[in-house]
Amino acid sequence: MQISPDTKYYRTENIWVDAEFYFYGILKDAGGKNKANIHLDTEDYCYLAIETGEDFLKECEENLLYKNFGVRAIGKQNTETGELDTKNLRLLELINYNPKFDASYLNDLIAKAKKNWKGIDPDEWINNMRGTY
């Protein structure tokens, strides 16, 4: 195939791009006969099946079921609507997740970050990042 001035290009209305996501919930199921995956029960996206690969599940020494986890995954997202393609998610990382609020941990992080933000007005910075959004 050669590209020339007469070549016609067609663009679909909805464009799906690769994206990285973080999901939080309770791991309810793991395994699969033909396609190894985990099933995460989330508040925002309901019940998600995330492809893991058989090797990942073989290496897990502890029982993962019915525990809170954060999941870093890749998949497709619509650039216009923000909709996720929940049928083709793949696991990147399983994160131990304890949803308990820890004020001292948060205050320590804020204290560390203050050095880097010295002289920067946060409201002005966020407005510049957002642009006309």
Image: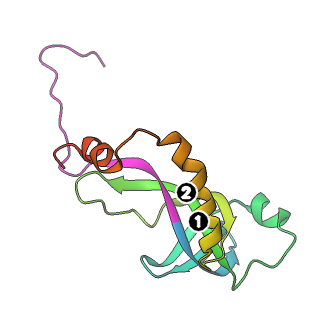
Colour mapping: rainbow
- Residue 5 place in picture, x, y as percent: 13, 14
Q: Which residues are magenta?
A: 1-22
Horizontally, residue 57 falls left or right of residue 92, namely right
Circles 1 and 2 in contact, beta carbons < 8 Å = yes
Label 1, residues with CA under 10 Å away: few <14, some 14-19, many ≥20: few
Residue 83, numbered label = none
Q: Nearer the viewer, residue 123 or 21?
A: 123
Horizontally, residue 122 falls left or right of residue 40, namely left
Mark 2 residue element: helix
Q: Nearer the viewer, residue 73 or 49?
A: 73
Q: Please name the residue shown 31% across and 48% down the image.
A: 126
Camera sees residue 33? yes
Magenta stretch, main secondary structure class = loop
Residue 110, numbered label = 2
Disc 1 residue type (three-letter) = Leu
Marks 1 and 2, how far apart at CA: 6 Å
